[in-house]
Amino acid sequence: MAVGLLAGCGGAEEMDATVSPEEQGQVEQGVTHWECVNDCDSKWFYCVYGGGGTPRPTCDSYKAFCISQCPP
């Protein structure tokens, strides 16, 4: 289901790009809280399943930091 949501919302293009660990917690400015959380979820999904070999606890930490940076 998550793959279908990502493909429908432009996530497929984002998943093709390589995301460095430094970028995992970065969010775009001017987005709503839920857009930001969805972006963090997409980055987490790519981190876990993207084949980069990043350990899941590291991906979870990046996601928690990313969400903490989202607007209220």
Image (cartoon, rainbow, N blue to C red):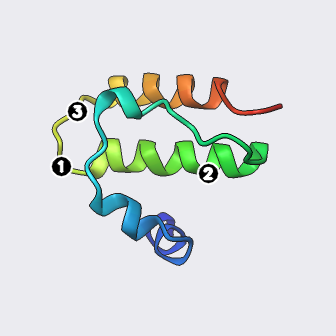
Nearer-N-terminus badge (2/3) = 2
Q: Residue at x 34, y 23 (%)?
A: 58
Residue 2 is left or right of residue 71, and the answer is: left
Check disc 1 and report its element: helix, strand or loop: loop
Q: Position of residue 19 (x, y in %)?
A: 31, 43
Q: Give the Cα distance between marks 2 and 3.
A: 20 Å
Q: Determine the residue positioned at 16% across, 37% down.
A: 53
Residue situated furthest right in the rendering: 72
Q: Amino acid at mark 1?
A: Gly
**Residue identified by numbered label 2:** 38
Q: CA distance from mark 3 to mark 1?
A: 8 Å
Q: Which residue is mark 1?
A: 51
Q: Position of residue 65 (x, y in %)?
A: 54, 22
| Sequence-earlier tag: 1 or 2 | 2
Residue type highlighted by circle 2: Asn
Helix, strand or loop under label 3: loop
Q: Which mark is residue 54?
A: 3
> Height in image: 67 above or below 33?
above
**In this view, 26 is above or below 15:** above
